[in-house]
Amino acid sequence: MGPAAYGFVDFLVSAKQRMWQVLPLNPTGYGNSPYAALSAFAGNPLLISLEFLVRDGWLYQGEIEGLAGHYGQADFDRAWNEKLPLIQRAAQRMLDGGQHPVREHFEQFCKNNAYWLNDYVRYVVLRREHDYACWCDWPDPLAAREPGAMNAFDAEHADALWCERAVQFLFQQQWSALKSYCNQHDIQVMGDMAIFVNYDSADVWANREIFDLKKDFKPRVVSGVPPDYFSATGQRWGNPLYLWKQIEKTGFDWWVKRVQRQMELYDVLRLDHFRGFEAYWEIDAAEETAVNGKWVKAPGAKLFKKLQAVMGKPLPLVAEDLGLITAKVDKLREDFAMPGMRVMQFGFSDRGAHLHLPHKWVQNMVAYTGTHDNNTTLGWYRDDVDDETRRNVQAYVGPLHHQNDVVWALIRAAERSVANTCIIPLQDLLHLGSDGRMNTPAGTDGNWAWRFHPEALHPDIAAQMAAITEMTDRDGYVAPDEASGATV
């Protein structure tokens, strides 16, 4: 969230873009995946800018010199070992600052966020104290959150707990400033929220009563999806499933707080695996794959009605409605006026997939060339598809003199569609091949580590994107004689 992030926003401005979609910003757990977070509410400390901690007086310049370079593949282990201690040092200095002007803001932050913050910092310190073992393997009194054990722990580790609160405050400060910079330049930020939470997380440990767990606290059933485009054996995600009836009895309290927290961070929120709000794939925890499972009804309509009552209409939500989508899933999305998603790469395999091509799109939709779960457009065209699919692509977008031309051909096709919103992955703007892929679903190694170098954001790319954006009326300009309406 440092200077390079602001440089990226400046690039978006020069390219006449009006929305920045980000992956979940939560602290990552298994495989460094933002979809396997340690908390559904907290921010990832590793995103905190050391440069800005120096600027704000919490670190000295000499303390950050000689660290690893900022670019290339992300080295999470090195960042954890070298960067996190410096962030904690800065947090402690802030706490030791007495009546520094920031102190009042910090105390207000702790008060406003106590409903998740207190349990999260306990979880972080306990996890560290037990060599990062899963909470279910902690001593029984702590795993079970027995009041006496928790009170004793709070008293013994008070300093460490306050330090972790301060780390979250520093994240909040820096992210709020960056988002404000976006909004000042007429750019909205679209966040991303996974429907399920990680088993080894502060959320499950602190809210066991709303998850389907056995007496030993282990999951009885877990999440996933049946065999699909990405995997012949489906995807066994392994997240614990919700006890929706119990959650409904509380007025969906945990879910309301979760979405409200996200809307403090973002302008628009993408709901990952939207189909799970209508029905979800339930897998026995003993199963090794997702092949054997069943669909179980979810109370999505009741949840969204509750969110409307609390947050108003329309809900600023986008439905990730990819995969096996039924008429009931479509109706749930349409009943709450949520835009769905279409991904051009999916549209060329056969006639049944043509709903992902622009001639089938509608206005209330978010269009993509590809997503973080796909190869880059160039990598897909070069490495993943057969000759028949390549012929289908050229039949749709016109002859390609070189295979590299496919990237801008698909970008132009998406941008000139009727879809109100069009998101282009940065890897496509940078014309990257398979080495720029962010994630391979069902894969375990090498995911989530791609980063761009600021020098790659060449002014010529911004100029080309700005020209397309202006010509397709996506730059926010509304002619005086046009009827009023939303433009994105």
Image (cartoon, helix red, strand yellow):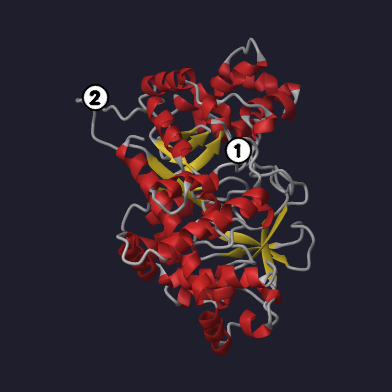
Q: Residues within 10 Å of mark 2 (few under 14, many from 20)?
A: few
Tell me the quadrant of the picture where the C terminus can be found: top left
The type of residue carrying mark 1 is: Gly
Q: Is residue 336 visible?
A: no
The residue most toward the bottom is 148
Q: x and y percent of residue 190 in the render?
A: 44, 45
Real-space Cα separation, disc 1 to disc 2, in angstroms: 47 Å
The residue wearing badge 1 is 69
Q: Residues within 10 Å of mark 1 (few under 14, many from 20)?
A: few
The residue most toward the left is 480
Viewer-closest of 337 and 474 = 474
Closer to the chain start, of discs 1 and 2, is: 1
Determine whether the residue tagged by mark 1 lies in a helix, strand or loop: loop
Q: Report the residue at 60% width, 16% height from top.
A: 405
Q: Is residue 447 left or right of residue 276?
A: right
Viewer-closest of 49 and 280 = 49
The type of residue carrying mark 2 is: Ala
**Image quadrant in which you'd find residue 214:** bottom right
Q: Report the residue at 41% width, 25% height from top.
A: 15
Determine whether the residue tagged by mark 2 lies in a helix, strand or loop: loop
**Image quadrant in which you'd find residue 194:** bottom right
The residue wearing badge 2 is 479
Return the mark for residue 181: none
Q: x and y percent of residue 431 in the render?
A: 59, 24
